[in-house]
Image (tube, rainbow, N blue to C red):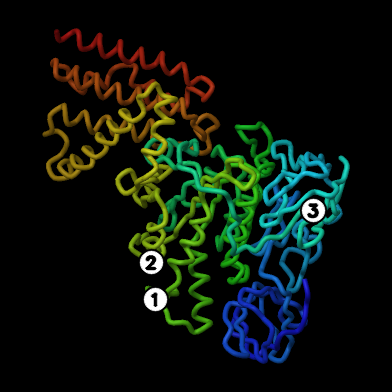
C-alpha cells in the first residue's frame, strides 16, 4: 500500500466529499479524507475532480484539507478471528473500538479487523515443493469448536511452495510460507485482503439439489429454498421480518451464518448481540456465535457505511464458501441499503429514477444477489451461499421499486401478511402471495427422505388452501352454515393446517425448530385426516361428528407434544387417527 496526497477537499455535502486538484487516483480507490483520516471511497472522477463516498461522520471537515490515496480498493481482511466477531459496515471491530473510544465510534479510528496479537495454532497440510494455486489449502486453524478455518492460497496466485512453517502458534500477520513463481516470491500469511466489490472466483456453478432446512414449517414445506438460493422477505412494519431473519439465523442448517444488520434500529441489533452469544446451536450443542459473524450497521451510523455493509458481508461469506462450507447470509434490510443509495445519489446530484432511487438500483441489486450460489470452488470443494434479504416496503406496498426490482433476481418470495401478524399468526408468511421456484429442484431430496410422498402431500395441501381462499369469499357473503359438509371440511382442514402446522411458536423449546422428518409426518397426518374425513362424509358422516373425535385434540397439540427426536412416534398418532375415523365411518355402513 502506497499512501500519497491525491487532492484536497473542495466541498462537503453530507457523506459525499468533492475533492479538487485530484491526480493519480482511480475509481473505487480507498482514500483517507482530512486530518482525521476519515475512510472513504472514490465513486466518480471528472477531470481534476473526484467525488468521495465517506464512511464516517463528516461534521467539522473543512475545504482545503488533504485527501490521501491508498493505492488499493476498499478491501477487508479474511483470516482466523472472523467467526464470533461483530463488525460495522466497513469491517471495523466494534468490540475493540468500544474498548478504545467508548460507546460511540469516534471519527478516524483505525483498528485492524483481525487481532494482530492473538496467536492461532496452525497445522500445515501442504509441503515444500507442492504446486499450489488460488484456493489450495496450506493448513488449518481450529477457529472455534465447530469451525475449522482452512488457510488458503489467495485467488489468482499460483506457484511452487518454497517453504512452510512447522506446526505451532502464530499471529495472523506472521509469514507462514512462500510461493515462488515467474513474478518472484510471494509471502503467505494466515490472512489476506480482498476487495469487497469484486466477487471471489470459483470453478463453476452447480445445479441446486438440496434444500436449506430452516426449521420453519411454512418455509420448508410450502416455499422451500435450495442451498445456494436467493430469497426476498418483503413485509410492512410490524409483520415480523426481523423475527423471521433471527429465526433463520438461529436454526437453519448452514455451517456459517453471516448476519448483516443494515440500517436497522439499534434495539433490534442489540437483541441479536445479547441473545446470540447465549443461544445453543441445536446442530452442534455449542454456542451459536461459534458459527456466526455479525455486521452491525444501525440506522444511527453513517449512511455511506450502510451501502458498503452488504458487500462486506457477502465477501466474508464467499471466503467461507471457498473453504467448502455452506453459508447463509441474512441481509436485514435491503430497503435501508437502497435508501442509502438514494441519499448518496441525491448528494451527487444524479438524475433520479422511480421514487427517487438511482437508475442503477437494479444493477446493484443484481450484483449483490448474483454472488449467492452453489459452486465448485477453486480447490474442487463444494460450497454454497444462500442469501435471504428482507425488504421493508413503505406501507407494505409490494409494488414499490426495491421489492419489484428484487423479484427479478430471486427465485423465492416469502411475502409477510399484515393481517396474519395482527392475528398473532407467526411466521406471518402468506400462503397465497408467496412462491418458490426451487420446489422442483429440491423435490427429489424431499421424496428421498419421505418415502416418495412429499410432492403429493404438498400438492394436496396447497390445493386445500387455495380452495379455502375461494370458499372464504362465499362465507363472507352467506355464512358457513349454508355450505355442504364436503366444502366445510375444506375450511376445517385449512383451519387445522394453519393452527397445527403453519403457526409456529419461536419461544417454545419444542416448536421453535421443526426437523424435516417431523414436518413430513405432521403434514401427512393432516392430509390423511382430509382424505379419510372426506370418505366418511360420503358414507353419511358429519363434520360435527368428526370434530368430536378425541384424536382431533392430539392433532392440534402434536407440534408441542412430540419433539424432533420423537418424530417417528407421530406414526402412532396417524394410526390412531386412521382407526378413529374408520370406527366412526363404520357406523354408517
The local secondary structure at tag 2 comes to helix
User: Which is more N-terminal, label 3 or label 1?
Assistant: 3
Which residue position holds label 2?
A: 401
Where 400 falls versus 577 (above or below)?
below
Where 252 falls versus 536 (above or below)?
below
- Residue 514 position in % (x across, y down): 49, 31
- Image quadrant containing the N terminus: bottom right
Which quarter of the figure has residue 76? Answer: bottom right
Determine whether, in the image, residue 515 is placed left or right of residue 424.
right
Determine whether, in the image, residue 485 is placed left or right of residue 70.
left
- Residue 13 position in % (x across, y down): 59, 84
- Which is nearer the eye, 559 or 330? 330
Which quarter of the figure has residue 532? Answer: top left
**Disc 2/disc 1 C-alpha distance (Å):** 10 Å
User: Which is more N-terminal, label 2 or label 3?
Assistant: 3
Where 150 falls versus 9 (above or below)?
above
- Image quadrant containing the C terminus: top left
User: Which is more N-terminal, label 1 or label 2?
Assistant: 1
Q: Single out the residue that lies furthest toward the front.
A: 182
- Residue 454 position in % (x across, y down): 36, 28
**Crowding near pointer 2: few (<14 within 10 Å), some, many (20+)?**
many
Which numbered marker is on residue 353? 1
- Which is nearer the eye, 68 or 550? 68
Which numbered marker is on residue 179? 3
| Residue at 65%, 40% in the rendered image | 288
Amino acid at each position: 500500500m502506497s499512501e500519497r496526497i491525491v487532492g484536497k477537499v473542495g466541498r462537503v455535502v453530507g457523506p459525499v466529499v468533492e475533492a479538487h486538484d485530484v491526480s493519480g487516483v482511480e475509481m473505487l480507490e480507498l482514500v483517507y479524507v482530512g486530518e482525521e483520516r476519515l475512510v472513504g471511497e472514490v465513486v466518480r472522477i471528472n477531470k481534476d475532480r473526484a467525488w468521495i463516498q465517506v464512511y464516517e461522520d463528516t461534521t467539522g471537515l473543512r475545504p482545503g484539507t488533504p485527501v490521501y490515496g491508498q493505492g488499493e480498493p476498499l478491501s477487508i481482511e479474511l483470516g482466523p478471528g472472523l467467526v464470533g466477531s461483530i463488525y460495522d459496515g466497513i469491517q471495523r471491530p466494534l468490540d475493540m473500538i468500544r474498548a478504545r473510544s467508548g460507546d460511540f465510534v469516534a471519527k478516524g479510528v483505525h483498528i485492524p479487523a483481525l487481532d494482530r496479537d492473538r496467536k492461532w495454532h496452525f497445522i500445515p497440510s501442504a509441503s515444500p515443493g507442492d504446486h499450489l494455486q488460488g484456493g489450495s489449502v496450506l493448513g488449518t486453524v481450529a477457529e472455534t469448536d465447530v469451525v475449522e478455518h482452512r488457510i488458503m492460497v489467495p485467488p489468482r496466485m499460483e506457484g511452487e511452495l518454497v517453504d512452510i512453517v512447522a506446526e505451532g502458534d502464530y499471529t495472523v500477520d506472521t509469514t507462514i510460507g512462500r510461493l515462488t513463481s515467474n513474478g518472484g516470491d510471494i509471502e503467505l500469511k494466515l490472512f489476506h485482503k480482498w476487495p469487497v466489490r469484486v466477487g471471489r472466483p470459483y470453478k463453476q456453478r452447480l445445479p441446486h439439489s438440496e434444500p436449506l432446512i430452516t426449521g420453519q414449517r411454512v418455509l420448508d414445506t410450502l416455499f422451500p429454498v435450495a442451498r445456494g438460493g436467493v430469497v426476498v422477505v418483503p413485509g410492512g412494519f410490524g409483520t415480523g421480518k426481523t423475527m423471521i431473519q433471527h429465526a433463520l439465523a438461529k436454526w437453519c442448517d448452514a455451517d456459517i451464518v453471516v448476519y448483516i444488520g443494515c440500517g436497522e434500529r439499534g434495539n433490534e441489533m442489540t437483541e441479536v448481540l445479547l441473545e446470540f452469544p447465549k443461544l445453543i446451536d441445536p446442530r452442534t450443542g455449542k454456542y451459536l456465535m461459534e458459527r456466526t459473524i455479525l455486521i452491525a450497521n444501525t440506522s444511527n451510523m453513517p449512511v455511506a457505511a450502510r451501502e458498503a455493509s452488504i458487500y462486506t458481508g457477502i465477501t466474508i461469506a464467499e471466503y467461507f464458501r471457498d473453504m467448502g462450507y455452506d453459508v447463509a447470509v441474512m441481509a436485514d434490510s435491503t430497503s435501508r441499503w437502497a435508501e442509502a443509495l438514494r441519499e448518496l445519489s441525491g448528494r451527487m446530484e444524479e438524475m433520479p429514477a422511480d421514487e427517487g432511487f438511482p437508475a442503477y438500483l437494479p444493477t446493484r441489486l443484481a450484483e449483490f444477489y448474483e454472488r449467492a450460489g452453489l459452486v465448485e470452488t477453486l480447490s474442487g470443494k463444494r460450497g454454497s451461499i444462500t442469501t435471504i434479504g428482507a425488504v421493508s416496503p413503505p406501507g407494505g406496498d409490494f409494488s414499490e421499486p426495491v421489492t419489484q426490482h428484487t423479484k427479478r433476481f430471486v427465485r423465492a418470495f416469502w411475502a409477510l401478511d399484515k393481517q396474519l401478524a395482527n392475528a398473532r399468526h407467526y411466521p406471518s408468511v402468506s400462503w397465497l402471495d408467496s412462491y418458490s421456484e426451487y420446489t422442483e429442484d429440491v423435490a427429489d431430496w424431499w421424496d428421498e427422505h419421505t418415502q416418495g410422498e412429499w410432492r403429493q402431500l404438498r400438492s394436496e395441501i396447497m390445493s386445500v388452501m387455495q380452495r379455502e381462499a375461494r370458499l372464504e369469499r362465499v362465507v363472507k357473503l352467506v355464512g358457513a352454515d349454508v355450505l355442504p359438509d364436503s366444502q366445510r371440511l375444506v375450511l376445517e382442514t385449512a383451519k387445522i393446517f394453519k393452527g397445527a402446522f403453519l403457526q409456529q411458536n419461536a419461544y417454545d423449546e419444542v416448536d421453535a425448530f421443526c426437523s424435516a422428518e417431523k414436518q413430513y409426518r405432521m403434514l401427512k397426518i393432516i392430509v390423511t385426516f382430509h382424505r379419510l374425513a372426506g370418505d366418511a362424509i360420503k358414507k353419511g358422516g358429519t363434520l360435527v361428528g368428526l370434530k368430536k373425535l378425541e384424536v382431533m385434540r392430539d392433532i392440534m397439540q402434536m407440534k408441542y407434544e412430540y419433539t424432533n427426536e420423537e418424530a417417528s412416534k407421530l406414526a402412532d398418532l396417524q394410526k390412531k387417527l386412521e382407526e378413529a375415523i374408520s370406527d366412526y365411518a363404520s357406523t354408517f355402513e
